[in-house]
């Protein structure tokens, strides 16, 4: 399994697993993660049993093996946990770009990232919406933020055009934000 550090992660869960407790993991995610989405998929093919796709996002990069061990008392192989690109994976929850697969309604997706999925399938927002999301991310962060974190966030959410256009403003806001967290 992938051991690459990242912000966005996806995993596949099975209700009948003997190596982890499905309900405990879903409960942990819904109670402890700010940014997540999941959907239950039916048996779509003969060789694939019903499963749940889960996607979650952290402001700071983490290792998948640390998440599996520390948050779920399991391992990345059992959870099929790996880092991923957020927007394509959110779209995959409903098989939006996979017409050959069973199509799911966005109403079946649960979690706090449903609004991101809705935006991702409705097409391009305007740059002010992107800037608003970037500023919200900065303001919600309770620690010092690096430009690398913001840049990766913008790549993950496809906000690069807004980042480049409003870089001077974003830079000033990050500097101001980070002054709160000087030791």
Image (spheres, helix red, strand yellow):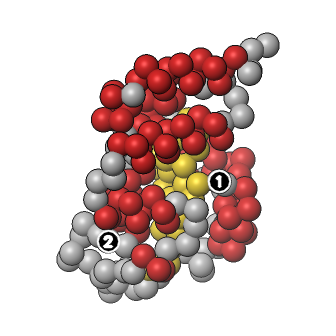
In the displayed structure, 73 sits above or below 168; it is below
The residue drawn where x is 55% and y is 54% is 56
**Residue that protrudes farthest toward the right in the picture:** 183
Q: CA distance from mark 2 to mark 1?
A: 24 Å
Rendered image quadrant of residue 29: bottom right
Relative depth, front residue between 174 and 38: 174
Q: Determine whether, in the image, residue 18 is placed left or right of residue 41.
A: right
| Residue 178 position within the rendered picture, expressed as x and y whole percent measured from the top left | 66, 20
Relative depth, front residue between 132 and 87: 132
Classify mark 2: helix, strand or loop: loop
Q: Give the number of the disc on residue 60.
A: none
- Read off the residue under disc 2: 95
**Residue that protrudes farthest toward the top in the picture:** 183
**Residue that protrudes farthest toward the left in the picture:** 100
**Label 1 neighbour load within 10 Å: few <14, some 14-19, many 20+:** some
In the displayed structure, 40 sits above or below 116; it is below
Relative depth, front residue between 49 and 58: 58
Classify mark 1: helix, strand or loop: loop
Q: Determine whether, in the image, residue 27 is placed left or right of residue 133.
A: right
- Whether residue 43 is visible here, answered yes or no, is yes
Q: Determine whether, in the image, residue 164 is placed left or right of residue 58.
A: left
In the displayed structure, 149 sits above or below 10; it is above
The residue drawn where x is 74% and y is 62% is 31
| Residue 72 position within the rendered picture, expressed as x and y whole percent measured from the top left | 69, 56
Q: Nearer the viewer, mark 2 or mark 1?
A: 1
Badge 2 vs badge 1, beta-carbon distance below 8 Å: no
Relative depth, front residue between 95 and 20: 95
- Read off the residue under disc 1: 34
């Amino acid at each position: 399994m992938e051991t690459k550090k990242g912000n966005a992660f996806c995993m596949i869960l099975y209700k009948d697993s003997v190596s982890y407790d499905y309900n405990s993991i879903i409960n942990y995610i819904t109670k402890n993660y700010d940014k997540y989405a999941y959907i239950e998929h039916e048996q779509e093919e003969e060789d694939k049993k019903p499963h749940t796709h889960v996607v979650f996002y952290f402001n700071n990069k983490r290792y998948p093996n640390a998440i599996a061990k520390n948050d779920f008392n399991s391992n990345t192989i059992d959870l099929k946990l790996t880092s991923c690109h957020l927007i394509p994976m959110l779209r995959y929850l409903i098989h939006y770009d996979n017409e050959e697969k069973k199509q799911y309604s966005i109403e079946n997706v649960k979690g706090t990232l449903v609004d991101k999925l809705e935006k991702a399938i409705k097409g391009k927002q305007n740059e002010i919406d992107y800037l608003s999301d970037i500023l919200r991310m900065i303001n919600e962060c309770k620690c010092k933020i690096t430009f690398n974190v913001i840049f990766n966030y913008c790549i993950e959410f496809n906000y690069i055009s807004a980042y480049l256009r409003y870089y001077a403003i974003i830079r000033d806001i990050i500097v101001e934000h980070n002054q709160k967290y000087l030791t």
